[in-house]
Amino acid sequence: MPHSIRVNALALRDWRLKANNLEEVMAKVIVLGGGIGGISASYELRSLLGNKAEVTVVSDSAWFQFVPSNPWVALNWRKPEDIKIHLPEVLARFGIGFEAGGAKHILAAENSIELNDGRRLAYDYLIIATGPALAFDEVEGLGPDANSISICHVDHAEGAATRWEVFCRDPGPMVIGAVQGASCFGPAYEFALMVNTDLRRRKIRDQVPITFVTAEPYIGHLGLGGVGDTKGLLESVLRDRDIRWVINAKLDRVAADAVEITEIGEDGKAKAQRRIPSKLTMFIPAFRGVSCLMGEDGKGLPSLANPRGFVLIDKYQRNPTFKNVFAVGVCVAIPPYEQTPVPVGVPKTGYMIESMVSAVAENIGDMIAGREPQHEATWNAVCLADFGNDGVAFVALPQIPPRNVNWAGQGYWVHLAKVGFERYFLRKVRKGTTEPAYERIVMKALGIGKLRHKHPPAPATAAE
Ligand SMILES: Cc1cc2nc3c(=O)[nH]c(=O)nc-3n(C[C@H](O)[C@H](O)[C@H](O)COP(=O)(O)OP(=O)(O)OC[C@H]3O[C@@H](n4cnc5c(N)ncnc54)[C@H](O)[C@@H]3O)c2cc1C
């Protein structure tokens, strides 16, 4: 055999062997959800596991939206297209598969999901990152299809922007807040204070009495027992901006021209009922799991999700029953921090979600290598609430008290930092990176890490 043919034959055999080997070791990972948690997870898996995993994102939309910018969209400070990214092209560039059909059922016992079009996709590992379903139906008249606007989805925010311009031509009283069972209070404060800024710029603030209505037991509780002095800071900011507030409030009904609430006393009993006039109303609703986590009877999936549809996880972000199923982001079940007269949940914010993502990617890497998972997310919370011309930031390390760092601060720099956060995150999604060097350096300098314990790797098993 001539030398050149023999070399090519050997190269071909070598290539075949490699291909077979890759087939053997390539784990199929499905990431359910194309939001902040899901996209970060797919990039982190791609960068950590390379050819050891075939990664596919399954979402129910072809678009990524940067949810933290939705309040800006609602006030026309951003256009929807500024904060949306079309996922199919971007993900294809990084070798990540994509399906936009959405999951109808999670068949965890069969290691597969059923898509809305009836197809089934099998997986070795599943990461659930489906975010929240918005429980507008739990309060009469609540939601963008009824009597209030919403900033929780970019399409809602786009609709709100139209209503905002109409309102500004013929202004009146506003009520803004967060309902009983809500867990996401930051955006409610943000929106009330951004509305104040926008109205002052238009010189019509004097025509708009604003009332902030919240389920929290005090202003600045945020579902976290406060962070640093968020109570003092946010009370002072609301007072300074002429925004009145009602705490321990249960929202009973949203009408076209008013909201009806019950104030609850410390003993948990109704104290007073009020009707507050409102020409434009925005409430953050309670969240629950998306429909594929609720089950046929709407009571959650046995062993996978609790009755509210939030995914049950252990300290490794892994479901205790289905040990190849992980979850990150808002869809994760976290018990309330404390009992309050009106129920409030614990928020799941961006950096905390990214810490969950890092732990999950490492843990799937461990399992592929034949080891037990060993990485725990810090759930450190770093949050920026923008008011347009000012803002409040807080750092809670860890998120639940008692904390090692418990700090809140205020200033125009928070607005700039939020703009920076938006640009950084959208760039990250476009470029396929998870943690560029500068983020690592800045966060490390601040003592903020994503992983709690990074044990030395356990000895590899024979399977590796
Ligand atoms: C208005 C608002 C402002 C916020 N601002 C901030 C902020 O400033 N800073 C901060 O740190 N945090 C903020 N948060 C909190 C948190 O960071 C966001 O909610 C974040 O988007 C949560 O990420 P996620 O991946 O869990 O969910 P999402 O980003 O909501 O993503 C969920 C994904 O799952 C997809 N999906 C849903 N159902 C299915 C299905 N059946 N099959 C497949 N895919 C499905 C959705 O289409 C979506 O792509 C904010 C939250 C809200 C609501």
Image (cartoon, helix red, strand yellow):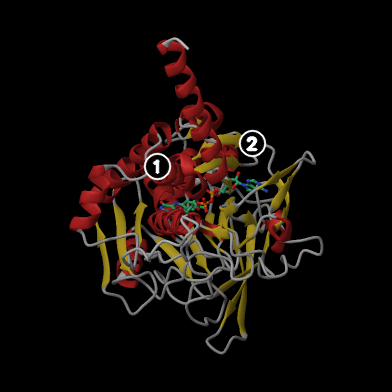
Query: Do residues under tags 1 and 2 come within 8 Å of each other at their CB atoms?
Result: no
Q: Is residue 419 above or below residue 211?
A: above
Is label 1 or label 2 in front? 1
- Tell me which label, 1 or 2, sits earlier in the chain: 1
Identify which residue, 243 or 115, lies in the foreground: 115
| Circle number at residue 196 | none
Residue 103 shows up from this direction:
yes
Q: As shown in the figure, which amino acid type bears the numbered disc 1? A: Ser
**Which residue appears farthest toward the front when viewing the image?**
1
| Residue 335 % position (x, y) | 54, 75
The x, y position of residue 196, in whole percent, is: 40, 50
Q: Amino acid at mark 2?
A: Glu
Q: Label 1 neighbourhood size at 10 Å, few (<14), some (14-19), many (20+)?
A: some
Residue 385, percent from left and from top? 36, 54
Point 33% across, 80% down: residue: 402
Which residue is the site of mark 1?
Answer: 47
Place residue 189 in its image quadrant.
Answer: bottom left
Measured in 3D between alpha carbons, the distance from the residue under mark 1 to the one under mark 2, in whole angstroms, is: 20 Å
Give the quarter of the image for residue 359. bottom left
**Quick one: 76 or 173, which is closer to the camera?**
76
Residue shown at 67%/51% (left/top)?
147
- Residue 161 seen in the current view: no
State the mark number for residue 99.
Answer: 2
Q: Report the residue at 21% width, 51% height from top.
A: 442
Q: Is residue 213 above or below residue 55?
A: below
The one nearer the camera, 153 or 267, is: 153
Query: Looking at the picture, does residue 78 appear above or below residue 413?
Result: above
For label 1, the SS is helix
The secondary element bearing badge 2 is classed as strand
In this view, which residue lies farthest toward the left? 445
Residue 5 as seen in the image, left or right of residue 291: left
